[in-house]
């Protein structure tokens, strides 16, 4: 592979990591609740704002902790007060509730923090590095490493712990899991908390990468994350991560080779349609 | 008979008195109709537009008004919506009976509203909207902002003559403004021997410019001409710096916001853009405006607030010249010569009611906008 091409792939992997982190939480929620958690994108934006507001006072790590905390609590709140009461309704009802919740969060952010785009106060003192002729900035490296770490951790959690077992049991059948004595409410709540915390970290990384925080920062990435979880086989954690990374690389290569023949969001949805035509259960298809 | 005649006389007298009294009252205050996107997606610019206009009106009134008449600014919100702009314009003209209008809005709403002003023969001064069609509506519509085609030609001129570039790559956003700028830039570049190596479009709202810059980096142009609004421009400047792109960066008026400095951070350093607001101007008017603006509004003045401030100053200047009726205000605007405002000297309006004024080049130095020359060549800045 030529140096130019590897550089383009690296740029795609960085972008794909951000997609994957955001989509993971969405996939996890879909896995246990079978709900398209549209408001996840709002949680993501709220995470970025939490860090934006707190970091100047309590430092970068405090800002990250605030983002994770605010998002986890937000996820728990959405589960307890919006999704759980609606679980026995037809799937359209929680979906509409989720869209409503998303709009509410966006407008709240606008009312509280104003419509202006704001610069992000955290600047990690990282040096860029060069690996095999590929130039990575400090932020690039940070994003790749964080994503790898979180993905690995999540995989271990799912496949090596009792909680992970309970989790997978609930994902495969909530009713049966409950009959087997699993406290499904607790598992679902934990799932929301962990998935939302990931969105918080994604929010901080995106804000860091682009140095921009604004109320609607969730909307475009949010819709794309929906495409990614379908590509990844709805609810599969590994499939979602793979689909996110792949989409990032495909988008970057297309833009770098031919330019913006069409908006990159169109690329995501065209890929979605093509994949669904060929493999109706997604790229990976099936189990968690 | 006598009684009837006397009665008629009284009625006539009343009518005449009423008319002249009304006229007298009108003469003491002049109503200026103003519309801007106060709410909606462009609310940030709407706020700037309103503040700039209010500041100008307050200053004129504090200095005794225009030829003894107080200015009254009537602000309406068009929500960046064409229909709304038509509705509020109708209201300003028919209900509020304004003498003259000022658009503090974007091209879309202004273009929709212009025919309403033209039909009622009420002059409209467009502060910064750039769409070429707006002034073609009719002889009551005047534009103070420089046309996109003029600014882009000045950009090419600056790239070649001021910044010494011989090769350039154009990156432009995918909308009316982007296409217009890129076409005019290329046309003028060809005329003056500036080689355009490539020209790349990107969608509005795009966040990730790394792949696009990776595509153009191997061409190593002397200069990248970037037609974008400040949030995208900041992302492009950052990505270019991260990828080690060595080309100079030249932007346009869309960059002209303190937000650009904030969002691009140190990547803003050394970049250039064209605009009509020269921050480094030695004119005391400019300093005074920037200080007077920053105090009450707790934000630095930007191109939008400077433009609406300038528009009100132009209107006040025409009123000082004695214009009382709508037709006289129109005449006054058409005959405006060498007016010195905060955006520099407005030489005049062309018969197509486009402004003739210099285009300034600004450079970011030590985190601030600084003067980096001006394009005054009539063959470039004269609208065609």
Image (spheres, rainbow, N blue to C red):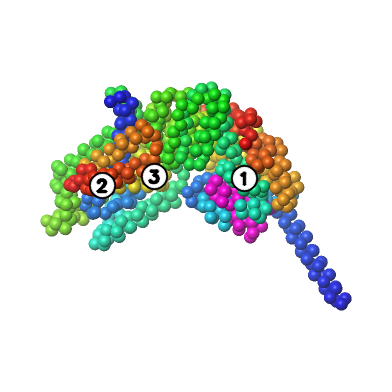
**Same-chain check, marks 3 and 1:** no
Residue labelled with disc 2 = A277
Q: Is B369 rendered above or below residue B220?
A: below
Residue at screen point 26% across, 61% down = A90
* Residue A125 in the image, given as x and y percentages of width and height: 35, 30
Q: From what the image shows, is residue A69 above or below residue A140?
A: below
What is the distance, in whole Å, between disc 2 and disc 1 at their CAs?
A: 51 Å
In space, the residues marked 3 and 2 are separated at their CA atoms by 30 Å
* The furthest residue to the left: A180
Query: In front: mark 3 or mark 1?
Result: 1
Other-residue count near label 3 (Cα within 10 Å), few / some / many at <14 / 14–19 / ≥20: many
Tell me where residue A277 appears, x and y as whole percent: 26, 47
Chain of residue at mark 1: B
Q: Which residues are magenta?
A: B88-114
| Quadrant including the N terminus of chain A | top left
Residue B244 in the figure: left or right of residue B52:
left
Is the residue marked by circle 1 packed among few (<14), some (14-19), or many (20+) residues within 10 Å? many
Mark closer to the observer (2, 1): 2
| Element assignment for label 2 | helix
Residue A115 appears anywhere in the view: yes
Same chain letter for marks 2 and 1: no
- Residue at the image position 22 percent from the left and 45 percent from the top: A279
Q: Which residue is mark 1?
A: B135
What chain is tagged by disc 2?
Answer: A
């Amino acid at each position: 592979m030529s140096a130019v091409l590897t550089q383009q792939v690296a740029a795609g992997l960085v972008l794909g990591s951000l997609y994957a982190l955001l989509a993971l939480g969405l996939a996890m929620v879909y896995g246990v609740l079978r709900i398209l958690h549209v408001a996840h994108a709002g949680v993501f934006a709220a995470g970025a704002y939490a860090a934006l507001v707190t970091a100047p006072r309590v430092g970068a790590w405090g800002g990250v902790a605030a983002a994770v905390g605010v998002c986890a609590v937000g996820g728990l709140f959405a589960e307890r007060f919006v999704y759980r009461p609606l679980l026995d309704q037809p799937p359209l009802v929680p979906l509409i509730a989720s869209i409503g919740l998303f709009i509410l969060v966006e407008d709240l952010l606008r009312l509280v923090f104003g419509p202006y785009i704001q610069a992000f106060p955290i600047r990690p003192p990282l040096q860029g590095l060069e690996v095999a002729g590929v130039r990575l900035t400090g932020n690039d490296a940070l994003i790749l490493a964080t994503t790898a770490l979180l993905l690995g951790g999540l995989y271990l959690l799912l496949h090596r712990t009792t909680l992970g077992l309970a989790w997978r049991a609930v994902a495969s059948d909530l009713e049966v899991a409950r009959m087997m004595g699993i406290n499904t409410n607790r598992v679902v709540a934990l799932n929301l908390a962990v998935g939302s915390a990931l969105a918080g970290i994604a929010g901080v990384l995106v804000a860091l990468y682009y140095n921009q925080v604004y109320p609607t920062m969730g909307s475009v990435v949010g819709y794309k994350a929906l495409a990614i979880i379908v590509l990844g086989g709805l609810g599969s954690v590994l499939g979602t991560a793979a689909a996110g990374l792949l989409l990032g690389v495909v988008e970057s290569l297309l833009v770098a080779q031919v330019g913006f023949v069409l908006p990159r969001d169109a690329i995501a949805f065209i890929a979605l349609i093509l994949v669904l035509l060929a493999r109706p259960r997604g790229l990976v298809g099936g189990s968690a | 008979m006598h009684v009837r005649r006397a009665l008629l006389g009284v009625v006539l007298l009343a009518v005449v008195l009423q008319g002249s009294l009304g006229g007298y009252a009108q003469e003491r205050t002049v109503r200026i109709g103003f519309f801007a996107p106060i709410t909606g997606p462009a609310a940030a610019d709407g706020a700037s537009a309103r503040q700039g206009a209010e500041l100008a009106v307050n200053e004129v009134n504090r200095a005794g008004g225009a030829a003894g008449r107080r200015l009254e600014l009537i602000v309406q919100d068009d929500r960046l919506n064409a229909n709304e702009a038509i509705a509020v314009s109708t209201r300003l003209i028919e209900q509020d009976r304004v003498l003259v209008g000022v658009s503090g809005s974007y091209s879309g709403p202004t273009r929709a509203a212009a025919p309403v002003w033209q039909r009622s023969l009420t002059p409209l001064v467009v502060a910064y909207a750039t769409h070429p069609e707006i002034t073609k509506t009719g002889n009551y519509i005047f534009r103070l902002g420089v046309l996109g085609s003029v600014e882009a030609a000045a950009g090419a001129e600056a790239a070649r003559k001021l910044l010494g570039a011989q090769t350039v790559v154009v990156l432009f956003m995918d909308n009316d403004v982007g296409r217009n700028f890129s076409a005019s830039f290329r046309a003028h570049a060809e005329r003056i021997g500036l080689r355009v190596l490539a020209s790349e479009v990107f969608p509005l709202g795009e966040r990730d410019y790394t792949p696009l810059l990776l595509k153009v980096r191997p061409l190593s142009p002397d200069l990248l001409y970037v037609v974008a609004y400040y949030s995208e421009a900041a992302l492009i400047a950052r990505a270019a710096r991260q990828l080690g792109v060595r080309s100079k960066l030249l932007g346009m008026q869309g960059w002209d916001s303190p937000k650009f400095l904030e969002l691009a951070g140190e990547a803003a350093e050394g970049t250039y853009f064209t605009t009509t607001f020269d921050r480094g101007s030695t004119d005391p008017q400019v300093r005074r405006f920037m200080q007077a603006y920053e105090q009450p509004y707790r934000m630095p003045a930007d191109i939008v607030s400077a433009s609406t401030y300038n528009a009100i100053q132009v209107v006040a200047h025409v009123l000082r010249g004695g214009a009382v009726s709508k037709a006289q205000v129109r005449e006054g605007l058409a005959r405006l010569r060498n007016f010195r405002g905060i955006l520099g000297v407005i030489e005049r309006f062309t018969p197509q009611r486009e402004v003739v004024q210099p285009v300034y080049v600004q450079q970011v130095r030590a985190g601030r906008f600084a003067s980096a020359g001006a394009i005054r060549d009539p063959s470039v800045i004269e609208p065609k």
